[in-house]
Amino acid sequence: ISPNDIMSYFGLTIMTDCHKIKMMVYISGPITNNDNYILDFYNRESQLKKMGYQVCNPAAFSKEVEADILYRFGRKPTYNEYMKFAIKKLLDCDAITMLPNWQESKGATAERQIAIVLNYIQVEVRECLS
């Protein structure tokens, strides 16, 4: 059995030369009281995908949380329910990226602390000025 066979069995992507093994990066940043959060999160997702990463985008799974809570309890999710779901998703990732102003968000601060405790890589995305 080759290393490639083992990696394939576990669903891992093997890349050669200057390419990296695909890592799942969690996007963390302010959502509550941020009218532009959808744009902020999807822009970062696009940047990360161009860099070759897989992405876990909380803005994308918020509808999943809403549907689950509506089905089970017949109401909208609470902040705590969103955070529990988000933290479960974070635990399945390999790295984290922080959006601007993350320090103003209680949830993003908690997500970052979890990532630090778990020794996650922090992926930086720098904007290039033309």
Image: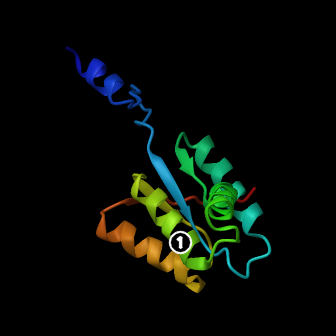
Note whether residue 116 is visible: yes
Within the image, what quadrant is residue 5 found in?
Answer: top left
Instruction: Name the element at disc 1.
Output: helix
Residue closest to the far right: 35
Q: Position of residue 103 (x, y in %)?
A: 55, 83
Q: Amino acid at mark 1?
A: Met
Q: Percent position (x, y) of residue 45?
A: 64, 52
Which residue is tagged 1? 83
| Identity of the residue drawn at 62% across and 58% down | 68
Given residues 104 and 18, the one toward you in this image is 104
Which residue is at the front of the view, 116 or 9?
Answer: 9
Q: Residues within 10 Å of mark 1 (few under 14, many from 20)?
A: some
Position of residue 117 relative to residue 13, above or below, is below
Q: Can you see residue 128?
A: no
| Colouring rule applied to residues | rainbow
* In-image side of 57 versus 37 (left or right): left
Query: For residue 117, what is the image quadrant?
Result: bottom left
Instruction: Locate the N terminus by quadrant.
Output: top left
Count the marks: how many?
1
| Side (left or right) of 103 relative to 74 | left
Q: Choose between 120 and 9: the one closer to the eye.
A: 9
Residue at the image point whose x is 56% and y is 43% from the top? 51
Q: Quadrant of the C terminus?
A: bottom right
Q: Residue furthest top?
A: 1
41 relative position to 95: left or right: right
Residue at 40 percent across and 58 percent down: it is 91
